[in-house]
Image (cartoon, rainbow, N blue to C red):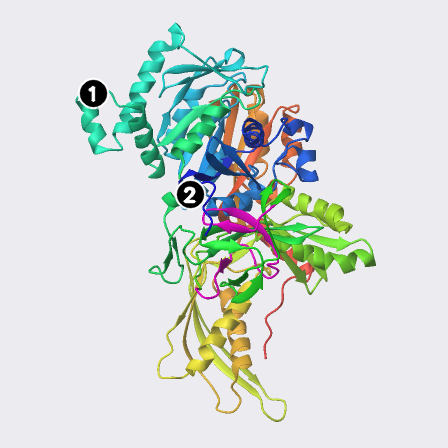
Amino acid sequence: MAKRDIPLERVRNFGIMAHIDGGKTTTSERILYYSGKNYKIGEVHDGAATMDFMVQEQERGITIQSAATTVTWGDYRLALIDTPGHVDFTAEVERSLRVLDGAVALYCAVGGVQPQSEQVWRQSEKYKVPKIAFVNKMDRVGANFYNVMEQMRNQLGANPVPMVIPIGAAETFEGVIDLVQMKALYFDMKSLGKTVIEKDIPEEYLEKAKEYRQKMVESAAEQDDALMEKFFNGEELTIPEIKAAIRKGCLSRAITPAFCGSAFKDKGVQPLLDAICDYLPSPLDTGAAVSADDPSQKREVSDDEPFCGLAFKIMSDKNMGKITFVRVYSGTLKLGAELLDSTINQEQRISRLFRMHANKQEPLDEARAGDIVACVGLTQTRTGDTLCDPEHPITLESIDFPAPVISVAVKPKSRSDNEKLGAALHALAMEDPTFVVTFDQETSETIIAGMGELYLEVIVDRLKREFNVDCDVGAPQVAYRETITAPVDNEYKHVKQSGGRGQYAHVCLKIDPQEPGKGFEFVNEVKGGVIPTEYIPAVEKGVKKALEAGPLAGFPVVDVKVTVYFGSYHEVDSNEFAFIECARQCFKKGFLKGKPQLLEPMMDVEVAVPEQYMGAANGSINQRRGRVEGMEDRAGVKLIKATVPLGEMFGYSNAIRTVTQGRGAFTMIFKQYEAVPASIAKTVVEKRIKEGKVRPSTDD
């Protein structure tokens, strides 16, 4: 096998994650420019950023899809994924973190740790991703690097260790002090910051630099017993020792090395690139890929192992069709290779293989362990599927995605649009698992569901631009849920006789409420074969069918435990269908006796307003059935933290702008489901009955 041009230990697969408008894409553009990948800098506000290549991204000035690119820095190869910061596109962050080895957690020096910063931090912790922090926008009025460090400790439970400290802040921000080398770094503006000028530390910053270097060296020493002993003996740690210890702490997630700068003003990005090479993990550091079915089955990170990889993203391209992004965990993936999708047990052949640079492709003949590549030809593969060598099957842990919280009805404007709509929605649903398409039989409507208003707005826009499908869109609908609050026993007999062979089934079900978030549980406690074993799966199937559209208002049922404990059957008339229908009806009738309750999605809302508009902003939250949880000052504005029902948040962006004369802004992320007040639940149920969305349970 040909030798690698870059050894695995010098490969870094990382993502940039942050709150919306933290400066992720601007930082990515600087990385592309300084590494020589781009010859000019594309700016987000001009709609010219390389990584924001979708029309919708350029128009809105935000990132919607995670874009991938590969650059070289020194003798390291960096695969970078720029992820979205808007909560509606949280699935893009989830799937990226599942396959990345490390991440840069980016914070605004003014806004600090914001709601989506917390969300992406939690997502990265779930996948145990080592991180370094970059405090961006040090040039803005109100910038405070040390405040952000404090917020990381208090709000994220992180242990940030400053590796640089800023020289000045806001309009006086000039550069950074490298605490490892103890040098002041300035960035030449004529070369757009490409030339880094090293100088001695200014006199007025020397004491502070010594203080923070001491703290950094102490944090490094804590990662290694031998260094700790050396430190306590008063010996000086060498630079290689400090770097190795900081890297060890970063990989174990005990510490988060922290840097600062202003990507927009071209300051502080090169030290960040050096830190990505010095401290973030290589594919070798992440360990073997482990089978989800059998933990003893592993694939070491090596080109010589059998191939295995994870399909983490799917993209529709009008020229090439379906592009599948794959993280290679072991072995070699060759162009034209026959692969097994072990998740769906189907073999497929790769017709094209390339490395992505935003929306451009660099053709490849093969990909090796640790690579992130894109393939064409995997027509059946979905997000989260495992791809492997057919001779050596393995199934890796998939990717968990949150359920959609908002839906709208879409109606094609013409007959030709109607014919294209199905194929277009199927292609979009293949791209994103949080996008769900259903067809409502009662109203003959196509319902699309996703993570938020902006998300669905982008979907409808893409239908029009990419697939030439014009649609009328209904009003947004909240994804309510149903549950019970009291345990109930119910018995039901399904008997049908219509000449010849009839239908007979009889079941007794115990339905118990579960704690929120526990989901559905089915228990079989039938004794003595009163219901034959072969019909128990049919009982479960019938109950699951009933869960899809609850008896109260036709919404999915959650958090219930159903136990089948008694029943009877008929030698001739009992069959699988009879038990499915019997269990479905038994559950529906029993559910209505268990004090059913409607649940609604609640959102964590953070409103930022100038102090004089505090009263108006609080009033706007209270009008929406919101609970104000707390208030704090941050960078000259008041932050109001509240919990508000999603159903009350439609159109809130216009409302908050109106009451604050355009100076207020808000962010929200999904928190949990809570009970709907009785008066509102009654209105919702009556509306659903009127629309024909509730199927009455039939007596047979």
Residue 366 falls inside the magenta stretch: yes
Q: Residue at x 40, y 30 (%)?
A: 152
Residue 319 can be seen in this image:
yes
| Secondary structure type for disc 1 | loop
Q: Residue at x 56, y 51 (%)?
A: 365
Q: Is residue 610 above or below residue 441?
A: above
Q: Nearer the viewer, residue 435 or 484?
A: 435
Q: Residue at x 51, y 79 (%)?
A: 579
Q: Which mark is residue 8?
A: 2
The crowding category of the residue bearing disc 2, from other C-alpha atoms within 10 Å (few below 14, some 14 to 19, many at least 20), is many
Residue assigned mark 1: 235
Position of the C terminus by quadrant: bottom right
The crowding category of the residue bearing disc 1, from other C-alpha atoms within 10 Å (few below 14, some 14 to 19, many at least 20), is few
Q: In the displayed structure, does residue 648 sit left or right of residue 594?
A: right
Given this view, does label 2 or label 1 mark the residue nearer the observer?
2
Q: In the displayed structure, does residue 515 sit left or right of residue 384?
A: left
Residue 405 falls inside the magenta stretch: no
**Tag 2–tag 1 contact (CB < 8 Å):** no
Q: Nearer the viewer, residue 205 or 478?
A: 205
Amino acid type of the residue tagged 2 in the rendering? Leu
| Secondary structure type for disc 2 | helix
From the top left corner, tell me how far across and down residue 576 is, in percent: 52, 81
Spatial separation of the CA atoms under disc 2 and disc 1: 34 Å
Which secondary structure class fits the magenta region best? loop
**Residue 221 sits in quarter:** top left
**Residue 443 sits in quarter:** bottom right
Q: Please provide the residue range marked out in magenta.
A: 363-392
Amino acid type of the residue tagged 1 in the rendering? Glu
Q: Earlier in the sequence, mark 2 or mark 1?
A: 2
Q: Is residue 409 above or below residue 608?
A: below
From the top left corner, tell me how far across and down residue 102 is, in percent: 43, 39
